[in-house]
Image (cartoon, grey):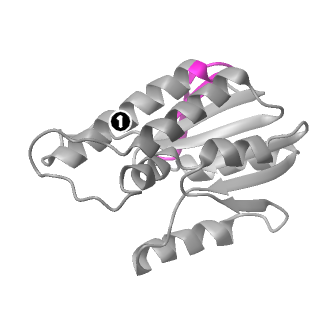
Amino acid sequence: MSVTLVFGGARSGKSAYAERLAQASGKEVVYVATSRAGDGEMAARIGHHRERRPAEWQTVEEELALAQALRAACAPGRLVLVDCLTLWLSNLMFCDGRDYPEVGAVELPARFHEERAALLDLLDEGLPGDLVLVSNEVGMGIVPWGAISRSFADEAGRLNQAVAARAERAVLVAAGLPLVLKGPSC
């Protein structure tokens, strides 16, 4: 298995870049979407992503059990594209419907820790085929005000670091331009 992490800020072009990688691979593509349409604005974003994808790509929608979805989707001769890790992380943080304090310690759900560990374990084990993981870089701005926002930024940064350490390739996308930080440039 070859793992590529594609990350960048909001509207940086990271998803479009990852989709170009998938298209250029010449392999069968499975697109794992982690987003949920919680409101009209998010539904519109999801619709835009769907319209952009080639019709022959298979789409799997999985909000929480990402490792399980990858285990089922990864296969020799196939490229699996996950968009995106930070939406998945957010889904896990709020999976049990709890309210978080504005100030003070944040205790994340047990499922958050279980699913995160399952993903990292799976990357350590390796799977057949190629895997492209899209994620947001949220650590380049100001420190968020509320406790849950700070926790999200911390956890997203930790996840990106852990995935990048396991990936053969890591690409930062800014203004639609890819900058290879690790691995081959093509």
Residue 93 placement (x, y as % from top left): 37, 50
Q: Is residue 177 magenta?
A: yes
Residue 179 placement (x, y as % from top left): 53, 30
Decide whether the magenta segment is chiefly helix, strand or loop.
strand
| Residue ranking furthest to the bottom | 40
| Residue ranking furthest to the right | 77
In the picture shown, does residue 119 fall above or below 148?
A: above
Which residue is depicted at the point 74% across and 25% down?
Answer: 126
| Residue ranking furthest to the front | 110
Residue holding disc 1: 155
| 76 left or right, relative to 101 | right
Stretch in magenta: 166-184
Which residue is depicted at the point 58% across and 74% down?
Answer: 47
Q: Is residue 90 visible?
A: yes
Residue 156 placement (x, y as % from top left): 39, 38
In the picture shown, does residue 93 fall above or below 74?
A: below
Q: Is residue 11 visible?
A: no
Q: Nearer the viewer, residue 71 or 43?
A: 71
Residue 80 placement (x, y as % from top left): 74, 45
Q: Quadrant of the N terminus?
A: top right
Q: Nearer the viewer, residue 15 or 119?
A: 119
Classify mark 1: helix, strand or loop: helix
Which residue is depicted at the point 11% across and 51% down?
Answer: 102
Which residue is depicted at the point 71% across and 43% down?
Answer: 70
Q: Is residue 15 magenta?
A: no
**Which quarter of the picture shows residue 132?**
top right
> Total marks drawn?
1
